[in-house]
Image (cartoon, rainbow, N blue to C red):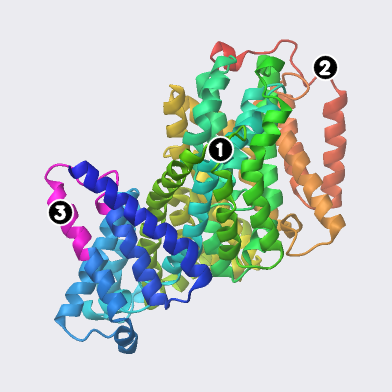
Amino acid sequence: MRARLLQAISFLCSLGLALFALFLPVYAFVPNLIERALHIGLAIPLIFLAGKKASSGWRWPLDVALTIAGLSLCGYVIADFQAILDQYGVVTGPLQTVMGLLMILIVLEAGRRMIRPILPTIALLFLLYALYGHHIPGYFGHVKYDLAQIVGMLYLTTGGIWGQLTGISANIIAIFVFMGAFVGETGGGTGFRLLSIRTAGRLRGGPAKVATVASAMFGTISGSASANVVTTGAFTIPMMKKMGFRPAFAAAVEAVASTGGQIMPPIMGAGAFIMAELTQTPYLKIAVAALFPALLYYFTCWVGIHFFAMRDGLRGLDAGELPAWRETLRASAFFAVPFIFLLALLILGYTPQYAAFWATISTLPLAFVSADWRWEGRAVLGKIGRAIKEGGPQVAMIASICACAQIIIAILSHTGLGVKISTTIVELSGGSLFLTLVLTMLTCIILGMEVPTTAAYIMAVIVAAPALIRLGVHPLAAHLFVFYFAILSAITPPVCGAVYIAAGMAGADWMETARYSLRLSYAAFLLPFVFVYDHSMLIIIDGGPIAILASVVRSTMAMVTLSAGFIGQFRGPLTWTGRCLLIVIGILWIVPHWAWDLLAVIGSAFVLLDRTRLYRRESSTGALSGSA
């Protein structure tokens, strides 16, 4: 009985979130306070009653109490929003203080339930700083704030829990999450799979390259490395193992490829929408700027797979194992149609919400037919229902992240701590841009080890981006730098979520999988440094066609030579001398100066022509024999 009740509550809240996300941001005006409180209110039952850590044993009464309290507190904001706005964050009595404090605790618990405890723990530390920071002497101290002032600012204003990030979650991210769910459930997932197998299956190391293509395409709608691994890995990992790929290598390929889906236009991850708001840049421009770095990321992964396949003699799929072109093209329409709607409306200048709305609507006629275009009208409601059930919990998770992060952002702004931290970063680096970039990279990777990409990006960008901008980095390049490394934390040991999941699915050792992941993506870790120093790669910032082309050529050559050096394979198995030489050549290619480019060209020609001193006579068989 309880299970059925929870399923009904989960579906109704997911349906409410779907209707709210699809229609209200496009066709209705709702005051910010009401919109954001309603968004969080619909997410609360999904978090406390239907989440993975909810409603079991003795916790059932507590979950119910938290749900009722959360709904009541959100309802109060909705019902009395005008009076609350008139208060300007000043509480009117002890009752409002208690209500606000309870709402803060519910948000922290929601964050703990939906993601790892690190984000709410950091938020709690910031709360303690706001309350007791006036005791800290010197630069990092602040004026005294009592509990009522902090609670009023967080609960009764749009600068606290109901701030900009929560608004982005309600206005933009939610509709794209549901769009991705509808595309996947109405046949788009099948189209991704068939097209990737058809285009890459017969190439050397084909099954691994299929994983790269499939993850790049699926990542455009999922925006989650973990979801990408689970979805595409379900068919790519067994396929790779069947063709003789070592389980750890198969898992690494899927983890690296799935991680890049969050930077792959046109949709990218949820953090991209937050970036659009924080930088006041149209989302389409961000997608265009991120295009070449994303393509180079996947090119690097593809090249790494190719070199491993050459080294280990791995083959592609047989012709009989490939789907027919007719079948592939028919299935591809299921994701091509909504993507065409999305891109066309974005290019025409409509808002992302409006474009995503019509892209979602375009999937509904496709729900009436199967992947081979046979009528299956009876399955329509089931497909729509599954899309709603899939999208609701994802939206609830993002809502909990944004609300929790809003506490951190509000305190950083209210106490002036954000400016103090960014100033300290610049001072620690001695004004050196490179050292500041390295410090920022380490910060992003460390934060991203314990929280999802969106949360890691938010926490890092609010303190690191101002420091980079002060040193002359273009704001968009600074934000993309932070976003990129927040994403790469998913494959960076010791805490690498995508690697853990992929290794579990492949039955492989996670440490071995992590080593393969780093060898496939070492070169990709240099890409953010490239576009910070050479903005031409981002297209929209500066540089004409020649500068853009030169940047792309240099970066492509750098990724090839660096990957070859790290893996130890180019035209054949490399000696240690050959590996070191290729790594040096790759670094030379990165530097945007004609003299270094000339040296890189000479070095690359030497490696191509020399077949004796840089190459070993016999090759190893790493992936098949067991060496990592």
Q: Residues within 10 Å of mark 1 (few under 14, many from 20)?
A: many
* Residue at the spot of label 1: 189
In the image, is 511 to the left or to the right of 337?
A: left
Q: Is residue 171 visible?
A: yes
Q: Quadrant of the C terminus?
A: top right
Magenta range is: 47-69
Q: Nearer the viewer, residue 72 or 106?
A: 72
The disc placed on residue 279 is: none
Q: Residue at x 56, y 37 (%)?
A: 189
Q: Residue 203: say if magenta.
A: no
Tag 3: amino acid: Leu
Q: Is residue 411 above or below residue 536?
A: below
Q: Which image quarter is the N terminus in?
A: top left
Does the magenta portion include 65?
Answer: yes
Give left or right: position of 490 versus 281.
left
Residue for badge 2? 612
Q: Earlier in the sequence, mark 2 or mark 3?
A: 3
Q: Is residue 560 above or below residue 177?
A: above
Q: Is residue 146 visible?
A: no
Tag shown at residue 62: 3
